[in-house]
């Protein structure tokens, strides 16, 4: 395999991506390694991460602030699609990968590199997402995944880095693997792999234990304009600060913990923990508003597309034709999704308490049991006669 001499590495500061730096240079013959750390809202001091990369031997290290783009282009699209993988996972980590792929490709062009690299192992989903996205963005780029080439255990990876004088604080081992961004936090591996292990508080960080959440409920009104959240409690906010506030509010009230068995792309099942307070509440509120403004037949067709969308994104097809076609459908459905949803947040549950929309399809005059009802009940008998005809014919034919 002929490898490009100049490479951009997606760098997180963790054990694997750190070991990638000497590996790319010494084992794979790269002459120029650019480490790129993407700020997706992990709340970490990325300047320190950048310095780690230089300590580990990178020729250049850059930090790209992509928080705003992440929420706007990826997070909001997922909210509009009500995207939940396997029914529970709002794709917080998965959505980061196509953006990282875009950033890698942009950095490769900027730094005149012929290859991009990442520290994903061969067992996870992230490698699939990056490897599928990059060639759709620039088919000429090579993709190098050192962690799929070396055959290191965790301890060997750390030992390998230490051989190159990378201080051990850089490669400090954690009891589990964490992936954090503004859309949510994922924890996997370590103790979590034991299905009999009930989580303890130390594993959670964004969402309070419901039982220790405040004894008085919080209320929040979320305004949407054509499917996008635009204000909290009447205060207009850009998507990033809006999500930040909602993460805090929902998290404090114990909302957004997920402990699930997930079906990975590579065929294995894994146990995953997620903390997705803001995103979960946004999807709940958005779904409620859609239910108020979209007709039943459209909702019925949107639901399976939402599942297909979540699966496509999970499996790394963010830039692929199926997901793009669903995007076009979803965009069209969002034109009327304007209105407000008020929720009560209390000890682990978010409950919608009121909803309103200028173009709502709810008609009080038709549904009321009051005397002013304009529904023509006398038409119901004839309607049911015809509506039930097919099943009566079936029943008669079968005795
Ligand atoms: N299992 C989740 C997913 O596939 C989370 C992956 C998190 N990535 C990581 N490198 N820790 O989306």
Image (cartoon, rainbow, N blue to C red):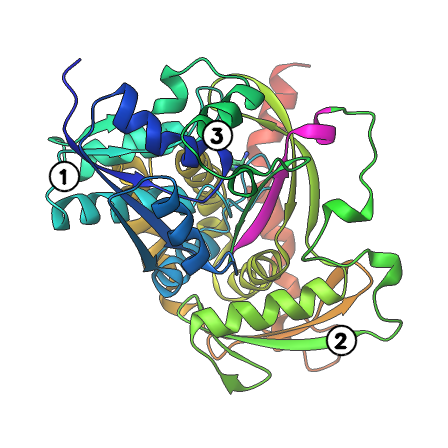
Q: Mark 1: few, some, or many residues within 10 Å (few <14, many ≥20)?
A: many
For the residue pair 393 and 153, the one nearer the viewer reads as 153
Q: How far apart are labels 1 and 2 at the CA level?
A: 50 Å
The extreme bottom residue here reads 235
For disc 2, the marked residue is 218
Q: Earlier in the sequence, mark 1 or mark 2?
A: 1
Q: Position of residue 352 (x, y in %)?
A: 69, 67
For disc 1, the marked residue is 113
Quadrant in which residue 178 is drawn: top right
* Identity of the residue drawn at 61% across and 53% down: 276
Quadrant in which residue 203 is drawn: top right
Q: Position of residue 76 (x, y in %)?
A: 42, 60
Q: Is residue 315 above or below residue 169?
A: above
Q: Is mark 3 within 8 Å of ligand 1?
A: no
Q: Decide if residue 99 is in sight here.
A: no
Q: Is residue 165 above or below residue 54?
A: above
Contact flag, marks 3 and 1 (Cβ < 8 Å): no
Q: Is residue 261 left or right of residue 69?
A: right
* Identity of the residue drawn at 60% across and 69% down: 246
Which disc is residue 204 wearing?
Answer: none
* Identity of the residue drawn at 69% across and 14% down: 399
For the residue pair 36 and 239, the one nearer the viewer reads as 36
Q: Decide if residue 66 is in sight here.
A: yes
**Residue 190 on the magenta span:** yes
SS at mark 1 in the image: loop
Q: Is residue 41 above or below residue 199?
A: below
For disc 3, the marked residue is 162
Quadrant in which residue 345 is drawn: bottom right
Q: Is residue 284 left or right of residue 259?
A: left
Q: Is residue 60 above or below residue 368?
A: above
Q: Is residue 276 left or right of residue 50?
A: right
Q: Which residues are magenta?
A: 183-193
């Amino acid at each position: 395999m002929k490898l490009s001499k100049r490479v951009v590495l997606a760098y997180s500061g963790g054990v694997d991506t750190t070991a990638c730096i000497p590996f790319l240079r010494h084992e794979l013959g790269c002459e120029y390694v650019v480490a790129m750390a993407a700020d997706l809202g992990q709340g970490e001091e990325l300047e320190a991460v950048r310095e780690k990369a230089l300590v580990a031997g990178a020729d250049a290290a850059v930090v790209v602030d992509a928080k705003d783009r992440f929420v706007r282009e990826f997070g909001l699209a997922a909210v509009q699609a009500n995207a939940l993988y396997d029914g529970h996972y709002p794709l917080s980590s998965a959505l980061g990968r196509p953006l990282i792929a875009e950033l890698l490709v942009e950095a490769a062009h900027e730094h005149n590199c012929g290859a991009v690299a990442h520290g994903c192992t061969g067992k996870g989903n992230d490698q699939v997402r990056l490897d599928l996205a990059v060639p759709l963005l620039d088919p000429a780029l090579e993709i190098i995944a050192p962690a799929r080439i070396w055959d290191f255990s965790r301890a060997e990876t750390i030992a390998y880095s230490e051989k190159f004088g990378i201080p051990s604080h850089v490669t400090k081992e954690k009891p589990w693997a964490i992936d954090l961004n503004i859309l949510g936090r994922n924890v996997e591996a370590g103790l979590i792999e034991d299905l009999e292990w009930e989580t303890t508080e130390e594993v959670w960080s964004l969402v309070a234990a419901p039982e220790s959440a405040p004894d008085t409920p919080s209320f929040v009104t979320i305004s949407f304009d054509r499917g996008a959240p635009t204000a909290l409690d009447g205060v207009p906010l850009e998507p990033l600060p809006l999500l930040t506030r909602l993460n805090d509010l929902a998290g404090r009230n114990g909302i957004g913990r997920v402990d699930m068995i997930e079906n990975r792309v590579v065929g294995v099942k894994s146990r995953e923990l997620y903390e997705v307070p803001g995103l979960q509440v946004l999807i709940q509120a958005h779904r409620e508003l859609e239910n108020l403004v979209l007709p039943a037949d459209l909702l019925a067709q949107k639901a399976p597309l939402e599942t297909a969308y979540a699966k496509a994104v999970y499996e790394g097809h963010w830039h692929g034709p199926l997901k793009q076609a669903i995007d076009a459908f979803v965009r069209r459905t969002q034109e009327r999704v304007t209105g407000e949803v008020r929720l009560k947040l209390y000890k682990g549950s978010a409950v919608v308490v009121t909803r309103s929309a200028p173009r709502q399809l709810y008609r009080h005059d038709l549904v009321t049991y009051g005397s002013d009802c304009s529904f023509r009940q006398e038409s119901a008998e004839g309607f049911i006669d015809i509506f039930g005809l097919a099943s009566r014919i079936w029943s008669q034919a079968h005795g």
